[in-house]
Amino acid sequence: APGVYQLASLLVELDASDEASRILCADALYQMGCVEEAHKLLLLALSRNPQRSPILARLALLQLKKGFVYDGNQLLKKVIRIGDTSCLLPIMDIFKDEDRKLMQTHCHFRALTILKNKQED
């Protein structure tokens, strides 16, 4: 992760508009345990492109990890509304095991709640 971070940081310096390098930097920071720095970098990337599902999904995980369930839900809803959920599976490979389980459990619980509410209606 440190080598990936250094390389991605150099790429961002060469082209500040390169979103892929920013995401790669954030992923490396996350892997190194620098969650706050990753969060700031993703917020910056989101400010440039607020409709990017890969950024929103990563931010959702970080919010859930911090215990901000409502914020995490809102970000996941936005990913679903955008309609580009194809980013979720590859992102799950980046997440650490405990975070992957957190996201899977959270999404499973929310899906069951939605289904239960629809059945009651």
Image: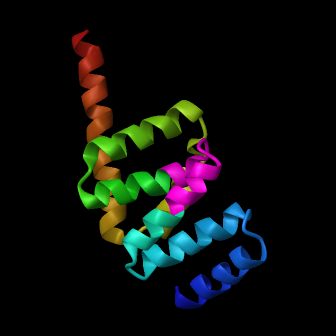
Q: Position of residue 79 (x, y in %)?
A: 51, 40
Quadrant showing the C terminus: top left
Q: Is residue 98 left or right of residue 55?
A: left
Q: Is residue 13 left or right of residue 67?
A: right
Seen at 52% across and 66% down, the residue is 41
Secondary structure that dominates the magenta span = helix
Q: Is residue 55 left or right of residue 76?
A: right
* Residue 5 counted in the magenta span: no
The quarter holding residue 19 reads bottom right
Q: Is residue 32 above or below residue 95?
A: below
| Percent x, y of residue 105 | 28, 50
Residue at the (47%, 61%) spot, across then down:
92
Residue at the far top in the pictured view: 121
Q: Which residues are magenta?
A: 42-56
Q: What x and y, as percent, mark residue 119?
A: 26, 15
Q: Position of residue 102 (x, y in %)?
A: 29, 57
Task: Give 53 or 13, whichever is nearer the viewer.
Answer: 13
At x 38%, y 70%, the residue is 36
